[in-house]
């Protein structure tokens, strides 16, 4: 069932601007549908576990402070859903700019979120409302990776370097240490 929803979700993400204005906004009822703060914390625990198992996402979280990320996601979702939280973390563009997250990784993030919401029996309509609220963040999360930095080629001819007298031109072995 989750695989069937992915094309529909991609359509939602493609048409973000028109749908973002029409989607019902946050409400205390929606927040409670997700289980309030305890439900969001449990959802983020499951979400992080799922991302760590996903080979496309694991590298992004392997060396990250996953406890902090889960807390910030729970806070952000709480605020989005209409709970009593105020998200004070980094803005999404700044938080994700250096990672080179592409469409494949973004789609994997969304799919894992859908999977854990299904696992937690969050109603489909509530899932769609949250996904519609998250869709505008795609533009801040997906970035083309910057090209790798390379050193320019050495342009000094080898015979331009003068080696002082007494310095061996080439060492065959490393010096021994006492």
Image: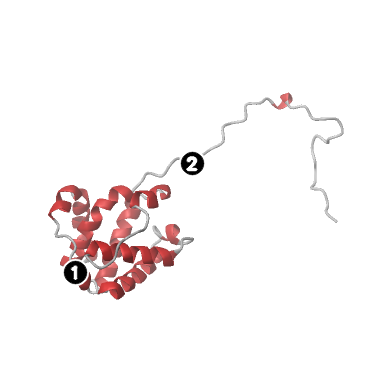
Query: Is residue 131 among the parts visible in the rendering?
Result: yes
Q: Earlier in the sequence, mark 1 or mark 2?
A: 1
Residue 148: which numbered mark, if any? 2
Question: Residue 30's x, y, as percent?
Answer: 19, 68
Q: Where's the N terminus, which quadrant? A: bottom left
Q: Is residue 100 left or right of residue 111?
A: right
Question: Residue 109's x, y, as percent?
Answer: 32, 59
Q: Nearer the viewer, residue 147 or 33?
A: 33
Which residue is found at the position 22% from the left and 57% from the top? Answer: 133
Residue 28: which numbered mark, if any? 1
Question: Residue 122's x, y, as percent?
Answer: 22, 71
Question: Residue 120's x, y, as percent?
Answer: 26, 74
Residue 163, quarter of the rendered image:
top right
Q: Residues within 10 Å of mark 1 (few under 14, many from 20)?
A: few
User: What is the basis of the colouring in this image?
Assistant: secondary structure
Q: Is residue 24 left or right of residue 135?
A: left
Q: Where's the C terminus, which quadrant? A: bottom right
Which label lies toward us, 1 or 2?
A: 1
Instruction: Look at the numbered discs 1 and 2 and tell me whether their residues touch, using CB distance below 8 Å.
Output: no
Q: Is residue 52 left or right of residue 2?
A: right
Query: Is residue 6 among the parts visible in the rendering?
Result: no
Question: Could you tell me which secondary element the residue under label 1 belongs to?
Answer: helix
């Amino acid at each position: 069932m989750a695989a069937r929803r992915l094309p529909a979700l991609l359509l939602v993400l493609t048409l973000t601007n028109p749908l973002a204005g029409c989607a019902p906004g946050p409400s205390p009822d929606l927040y409670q549908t997700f289980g309030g703060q305890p439900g969001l914390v449990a959802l983020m625990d499951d979400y992080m576990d799922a991302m760590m198992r996903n080979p496309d996402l694991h590298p992004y979280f392997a060396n990250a402070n996953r406890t902090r990320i889960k807390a910030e996601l729970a806070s952000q979702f709480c605020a989005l859903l209409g709970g009593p939280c105020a998200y004070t973390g980094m803005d999404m563009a700044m938080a994700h700019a250096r990672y080179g997250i592409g469409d494949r990784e973004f789609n994997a993030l969304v799919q894992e979120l859908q999977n854990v919401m299904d696992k937690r029996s969050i109603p489909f309509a509530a899932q769609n409302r949250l996904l519609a609220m998250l869709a505008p963040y795609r533009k801040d999360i997906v970035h083309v990776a910057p090209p790798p930095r390379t050193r320019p080629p050495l342009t000094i001819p080898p015979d331009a370097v003068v080696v002082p007298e007494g310095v061996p031109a080439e060492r065959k072995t490393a010096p021994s240490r006492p």
